[in-house]
Amino acid sequence: MMLAGPERLGRRLHLAATLLVTFSTWLSAYFILATNAWMQHPVGFLREADGRLTLNNIWALLGNPWLLWQYLHNQSAAMVTGSFVMASVGAFYLLLRRHEDYGRMFLRIGIITAAFFSCAQVFPTGDGASRRVFEYQGTKAAAMEGIFHTRRGAPIALIGQPDMQNLTLDNPIYIPNALSFLTYHRFSAEVKGLTAFPRDEWPDNVPLVYYSYHIMVGLGSIFVGVALLALLLLWRGRLYRARWLLWAVMLTAPFPYIATMAGWTTAEVGRQPWVVWGLMRTYDGGSPVLNTGNAMFTLLGFFAMCLTLGIIYCFLIFHTVLEGPDSTRK
Ligand code: HEM
């Protein structure tokens, strides 16, 4: 009904359909993330005599303290993505000097929304998510930040490459004391390094956690810069003619997808070696009845299906954008 458009449905019914789609996707995301939050931070369960875990409190699961920042951060990531894609299509039309009325509308709504949610991605949601990881998942936090040894007044590494042999960061550029301050609000606070934890509890791939986290945060900072600059020029009435910025906005569109992937890589690779944090190792989560060949077959099947859907999706999106908004108003 939403896709049928207001011309066929009438404005009110179309608005109702759109609100229902929004509500149900956000509710669906809540339940999906509640499941993930339970694996990150298990609550509301009993351990039976035979070692099985039984969920005995659904409200604890739905009100998991892990869920609040995870949900807000993840949904805000979706808003950043959607708004930059919208602004990017608007910038594309203005650069081509086609469908300019729509172009200006897409750009204006896209940039205002992107500016709000890009900032929310850093603070309060990104900040809340990191402090919660430091509180409950010390090994993931240390891997994300590339901190190998416990220290007071820990710096933030803007760049640098983890060296797993010597347990250091190569070629780092640091902001002194910043990590201690951002995490514990004291410049001299102690931050635990990876070596403070048993080696068999470290994430299997520390560099991947470190790089994916830095890609997410680096891209997030670029989004804030681009969106705020565009907002400033919009306010001054110069955005629609600033072709260099229209190019920048247009080219930003794929990167929120990459930041989202990087965010999930941080959360999930960083959770290793646990499938349920502190309770069950990924190694013990293997099914006794499914063999490797079957698992591989299913995985490749999903891969092929996602690839096919992805190609069709890109084709349809590009086709619709090139046709222009007027073509949908038949
Ligand atoms: C710039 C500042 C940012 C900070 C400080 C930050 C912080 C974090 C942290 C600490 C996690 C790991 C949470 C966990 O292990 O469960 C995370 C996950 C994630 N991030 Fe970010 N992030 C930032 C920007 C972004 C951006 C720009 C996007 C996408 C547009 C993004 C998307 C995600 C997603 C999808 C996840 C996985 C879901 C979750 O655990 O919340 N983040 N982020």
Image (cartoon, grey):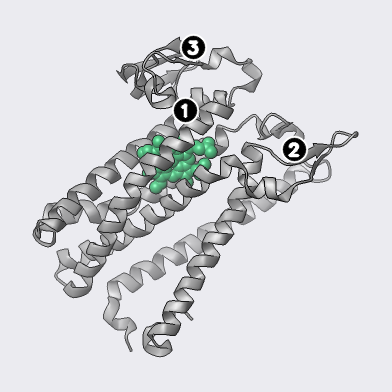
Image x and y of residue 294, in percent: 74, 49
Q: Residue at x 65, y 40 (%)?
A: 39
Q: Is residue 304 above or below residue 64?
A: below
In the picture of the structure, the residue carrying the numbered disc 3 is 150
In primary-sequence order, the first of circles 1 and 2 is 1
Which of the two discs, 2 and 3, labels the residue nearer the N terminus? 3
Residue 235: assigned label: none
The tally of labels here is 3
Give amino acid for label 3.
Answer: Thr
Task: Give the quadrant of residue 48.
Answer: top right
Tag 2 and tag 3, C-beta contact below 8 Å: no
Eye-nearest disc, 1 or 2: 1
Q: Pointer 1: what residue?
A: 144
| Residue at 53% from the left image edge and 63% from the top image edge | 25
Q: Residue at x 51, y 16 (%)?
A: 192
Q: Residues within 10 Å of mark 1 (few under 14, many from 20)?
A: many
Question: Around disc 2, counting alpha carbons within 10 Å, would you say few (fewer than 14), some (14 to 19), or many (20 or more)?
Answer: few
Q: Which of labels 3 and 1 is toward the front?
A: 3
Relative image position of residue 279 (x, y in whole percent): 73, 31
Which secondary structure, mark 3?
loop
Binning the other alpha carbons within 10 Å of mark 3 as few (below 14), some (14 to 19) or many (20 upward) gives: some
What's the distance in space between the residues labelled 2 and 3, CA to CA?
31 Å
- Please state the horizontal and vertical placement of residue 261, each as a whole percent of the image: 46, 45
Mark 1 CB near ligand 1 (8 Å cut): yes
The amino acid on which the numbered mark 1 sits, given as a three-letter code, is Met
Element marked by disc 1: helix
For badge 2, the amino acid type reads Gly
Q: Nearer the viewer, mark 2 or mark 3?
A: 3
